Image: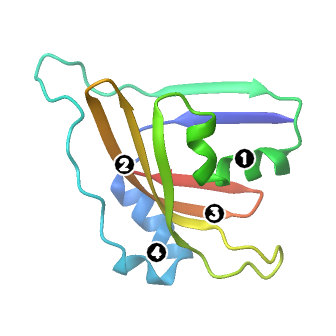
Amino acid sequence: MKVTTAFPRISNTTCKQNLLLHCPRANRIQPPSHRPFVSSSTFRPLQNLTASRILPYPSAALYELITDISAYPSFLPYCTSSNITSLSDPDPKHHKRWPRTAVLNVGWGDFNESFESRIYCLPYRILEACA
């Protein structure tokens, strides 16, 4: 199985368009507050990170791992906590509720940051998080 992971800087417009297409109640979701982790004019602009790997795991197992947001602190370095703040309605095909919004806290030493994400799930096909 080939898995491609990309961490591009996604515009709020793209994220909102996806949410409005697939989540009728998305227009009621308030955008997360924005504050820089470190603010200084000497830092370079944000960069994109793209990685592609062939993994020896079934795609369903990887999807389950990624959507298990509450377990992130157990395997993601510097993740101090992660909480799902809202879930979807039950999926008729899989009889499961998927995350819609979540908060991820990361930190190291005196540095701590909290990220709120809106999550778009098409079970076992697409997972997109917009922070």
Kindly report the distance in space between the C-alpha atoms of the residues bearing marks 3 and 1: 13 Å
Mark 3: secondary structure? strand
- From the viewer's perspective, is 43 left or right of 47? left
Residue drawn at x 50%, y 26% is: 49
Q: Which mark is residue 115?
A: 2
Residue 17 against residue 80 in the figure, above or below: below
Q: Amino acid at mark 1?
A: Leu
Q: Amino acid at mark 4?
A: Leu
Ranked by sequence position, the earlier of labels 2 and 3 is: 2
Q: Residues within 10 Å of mark 1 (few under 14, many from 20)?
A: few
The residue where tag 3 is placed is 121
- From the viewer's perspective, is 18 left or right of 107? right
Kindly report the distance in space between the C-alpha atoms of the residues bearing marks 3 and 4: 13 Å
Mark 2: secondary structure? strand
Q: Residues within 10 Å of mark 2 (few under 14, many from 20)?
A: some
The residue where tag 1 is placed is 65
Kindly report the distance in space between the C-alpha atoms of the residues bearing marks 4 and 1: 26 Å
In the current view of this chain or complex, which residue is farthest to the left? 41
Q: Quadrant of residue 125 in the image? A: bottom right
Ranked by sequence position, the earlier of labels 3 and 1 is: 1
Q: How is the image coloured?
A: rainbow
- From the viewer's perspective, is 16 left or right of 32? right
Kindly report the distance in space between the C-alpha atoms of the residues bearing marks 2 and 4: 21 Å
